[in-house]
Amino acid sequence: MCTNLATIFQSVGGKEPLHQQRTDSEPSKFIARYAFILAGWSVLLGGSLTWNFRQAEGETLSMAIATARTHISKDIAFRDWVASHGGVYVTPTAATPPNPYLKIPDRDVVTAGGKALTLMNPAYALRSLQEGRDKDSPVKSHATSLKPLNPRNAADPWETTALEQFEKGAQEVLEVYTSKGQPHLRLMVPLVVKQDCLKCHEDQGYKLGDVRGGISVDVPLQAFKADEWLRMTHQGWSHGLIWFLGLLGIGGFYRRVRYLDTKREIAQRQLTERDALFKNYFELGRVGMCITSSDHRWLRVNRSLCDMLGYSREELTHMTWTELTHPDDLNLDLAQFQRLTAGEIESYDLDKRFVHKNGNFVHTHLTVTCQRKPDGEPDYVIASVDDITERKKMEEQVRQLAFYDPLTHLPNRRLLGDRLTQTLANGKRTGLYCALMFLDLDNFKPVNDKHGHEAGDLLLQEVANRLKGCVREIDTVARFGGDEFVVVLSELNADKTISTTQARGVAEKVRAILAEPYKLKVSQEGKEGRTVEHHCSVSIGVVVFINHEASPEDVLKWADDTMYQAKIAGRNSIRFYGVE
């Protein structure tokens, strides 16, 4: 040991060991003192390493739990969305056959176009989502109950135990177990009965607030354990390095200058490593990264951001981010940026649109933070830019399906109800009358019978286009169903007589334009398409109303009744509610 310590001191100080310059008793005292300090230093580092190992194990479990909770949250959000819409209708297939356990009258329907649909209730839709997703994902989820309608939703023994704990007040149950030699995490949360659950489960005796079941998730821990091992390895190496540096520091007590030089070298190496790590993170990330100045100039951008916006690095660094921000999003971004640089907030997240070099809009999500100088003044701003254009497209598609008729692209009944309610509210504010026209095509069925449903669809689309050409931007044209349409005329006049005259003028215009011949280009399989000419009139019932006179339901009913009076009177005519 004397030889090893001598070598260490010689390597640190560049001179022969101190004990060779002193008496024979001094080396043993020095070695004992050094060994004592080294032992204390080793115990300290060993304790720190043990604590870090335990932290790594705890972090592994926390990440796995977070993954499981995120998975469950997505399932619950999807189930709640389906439940909030009363279920969703889909075309029956082998993967989505009619649910034999759903006992409601409108489970299976046929559209006006003859298309068969079946209702997927929340539990059925969620199970279909889970089964499809679990094929490609190692994480498995399962919605279950102690009283399932569908035997496929029955709980296994572990889930049964968890459900019983939920009924006693538990909010979450988890377990780590081993399967086929690999560790797994199981986590389960309860599902509580809400109002929209009673549609399918009230007959089972459930009440609002009862625990109806739960969603369990099985997360394989192998990947997490591999990451844990990697982090532990890094911790081991870093602690070993620190231990060794401490050893050098203790030996360098007698060679202070060399010790300080060594420390500076280590600090410089660490700084270089951090700079290299930051550069790798900045450049190799799959999201856009940028560093900007407080006056909005791009200081540094990565390749992902350049690809996202279509500009080169040189082009972007000669521009400001305000130049490429959509005008409608600029004020909000500038306000948040000002608060950030002023120190009012530490960071902010924002959805905004950038303008691509080709003129298209790129939907992004920004996470922005500010790095400050020692005096607190802003140094630079760093932001991550995530392209969410595809997500926005999917959201818009969902909105179209929820609020618009897929054939004519007109507002459907749901959106019509919202528009009518808004029209009534505006009437109360402005004091102006409004009008609602209920239209039913008089000669629609023959076109389907004679030329097929494709011709009928083309006719409905043409009717929709003609109707939109008869009204103003502030008015609403909606497809009510089948061959029925509704037109809402907003902000007519404060005088009912004048408003009635205005509504009559629009109704006459609609009746005349819909009576013009329709030339429908119908395709034929294996043959050249043919043009079909069809004549079709319309019966119109009109209600002139103001906010305090009626509810949306009353207005629709009055217009519907009046429309049938027009049909009885011989069709191709207009009738006003309350007018003989």
Image (tube, helix red, strand yellow):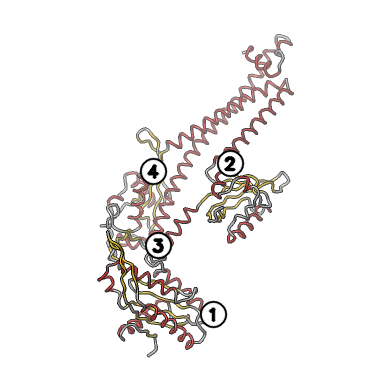
Which is nearer the N-term, disc 3 or disc 1? 3
Using a 10 Å C-alpha cutoff, classify the residue at mark 2 as few (fewer than 14 neighbours), some (14 to 19) or many (20 or more): many
Q: Earlier in the sequence, mark 4 or mark 1?
A: 4
Q: Amino acid at mark 4?
A: Ser
Label 1 sits on what residue type?
Thr
Mark nearest the camera among 3 and 4 is 3
Picture quadrant where residue 532 is located: bottom left
Q: Nearer the viewer, mark 3 or mark 1?
A: 3
Answer above or below: position of 407 versus 314: below
Sooner in the amino-acid sequence: mark 3 or mark 2: 2
Q: Earlier in the sequence, mark 1 or mark 2?
A: 2
Q: Are marks 3 and 2 in contact (CB under 8 Å)?
A: no
Along the horizontal axis of the image, is 58 left or right of 532? right
Instruction: Give me the residue at 27% from left, 70% from top.
Output: 448
Question: Total number of numbered labels?
Answer: 4
Q: Give the residue at mark 4.
A: 137
Q: Mark 3 belongs to which amino acid? A: Leu
The local crowd at label 1, few if under 14, some if 14 to 19, many if 20 or more residues have their Cα within 10 Å, is few
At 66% across and 54% down in the image, what residue appears? 344
Mark 3 and mark 4: Cα distance apart in space: 28 Å
For label 1, the SS is helix
Residue tagged 3: 401
Q: Is residue 440 above or below residue 257?
A: below
Q: Quadrant of the C terminus?
A: bottom left
Q: Which residue is mark 1?
A: 430
Instruction: Residue lying at the far bottom in this picture: please name it.
Output: 580
Question: For numbered disc 3, what is the local secondary structure?
Answer: helix
Query: Which label is found at residue 282?
Result: 2
